[in-house]
Amino acid sequence: MINSLSQFNINKLLDSFPDSRRILIAYSGGIDSSVLLHLLCSIRSKLKQALEVIYIDHGLQKESSDWGEFCRQECIKYNVPFALMKINESCPENLSVEGWARDKRYSLISKLVRKNDILFTAHHQDDQVETFFLQIFRSAGPRGLSSMPVIKKFGDGFHARPFLIFSRKEIEKYAKNNNISWQEDNTNCDIRYDRNYLRHNILAELDNKWPSYRKSVCRTINHQKECLMLIDEIGLEDMTAVLYKNSMNLNIKLIKKFSIPRQKNIIFFWLNSLNFEKPTSKHMDQIMMTLINSRIDKTPCVNWRNTEIRRYGDLLYASRIINSNDLNLEINWNTKTPLNIHGETLIANETFGRGISKTTIKDAEIVIRYRHGGEKIYSNSIVHSKSIKKLFQEHRVLPWFRNRIPLIYINKQLAVVPGFCIDKNFSANENETALDIHWSGYDKVIQPDV
């Protein structure tokens, strides 16, 4: 058993990353990350990974730029590449400063992480214990109470916390024995922040009464991790059973065959597998009531942070928040150049006998618009015009995407709904030079066969 940080062989942990070639060290200048930087630099000759350091300036304290300069100088001393990234915005009034700063920090760092990179942070045992208690106060289940993992996926790489088995006292001892310099953050004593209040006002009292409470809490955390492993194994099996065909949509009829706890676990596991934000208990209750148990003719939505779940028919769909688009937007399009709209692409490929006749669009004004309601189009296959609304219904277009599908107007007349229909006045005859228009978003807006 390792009982001293000076005896810690971090290479054993690094053996878990045989394809990694770069380590990013999250460095704040505080004692914890300063010890981590020293430890990794002391064994640099034995590492197969290159070391780099990143400092995030949150701009929350007036000293933050001075801390950044301190970190830069330390990296010069260690001869380690250093990068500084600054957050140039303020925390919204309705958010926790701690949580907001953490999310922003990881969001910035994730942009630097390449495939198989390892992000190292210096979270230690005391941090882990604090996280456990904060999760209790938030009414967390096993997922929250399992606290911080030693290793987890992070973007295209990994996030490692090698110090979780070591206490703050052990880190302080290592720093003293190795004459390590660091910066003190006075806000660590500000009990207006939840973690600091817990640390100074509650856990300090526990330490007086039960000095070994950290080890007991860590054992409980490990029990929660084992419980979570079992829950995830069941979740994978259950989710596989309710996935619709080859899609990542869930079949509500099949979900409802399970008990309520397993239904909730399926949804948790599903969202996690898609790398979406996990719902709170409140949102999970809304999902169960509003989506799982809603009428089939409804299209309800439950959303939180950057995630939303919708029901259409008997299927559940999960996605990032779909922002409303400007229905009055009009875009002139030169068909010789691909057009990017809302993350999707319109391309016009020259061909014969398929698509819109090039003769009909010579010197024409081609404009992209969105559906307002009442639009109609004439197809070669029908005598009378058909409304776009009915066209989308027949093709099972998901309702929340119907106003985001580009409509192509030629000289102010609706000519093409890409992937769905071409007006017969613009449709190419056999062997006639034509433009075949492809919209990359087509498959994403169609409901699978149910």
Image (spheres, rainbow, N blue to C red):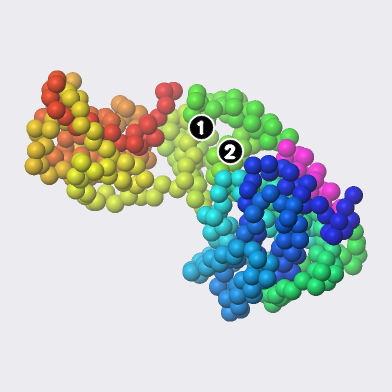
Q: Which residue is found at the position 81% from the left and 64% from the top?
A: 171
User: Could you say where residue 79 lies in the image, as x and y percent from the top left?
Assistant: 65, 66
Tags 2 and 1 in contact by the CB under 8 Å rule?
yes
The amino acid type found where label 2 is placed reads Ser
Residue interval drawn in magenta = 215-229
Three-letter residue code for mark 1: Met
Q: Is residue 312 above or below residue 5?
A: above
Q: Residue furthest front?
A: 45
Vertical placement of residue 264 versus 203, above or below: above
Q: Of 363 and 220, which appears nearest the observer? A: 363
Residue 167 position in % (x across, y down): 82, 61
Task: Please report the residue visible at 72 percent of the width from the left and 67 percent of the height from the top.
Answer: 34
Q: Is residue 216 toward the left or the right of residue 399 in the image? A: right
- Residue designated by label 2: 273
Let me know if residue 401 appears in the view: yes
Question: Which quadrant does the C terminus fall into?
Answer: top left
Q: Most prominent secondary structure in the magenta stretch?
A: helix
Mark on residue 248?
1
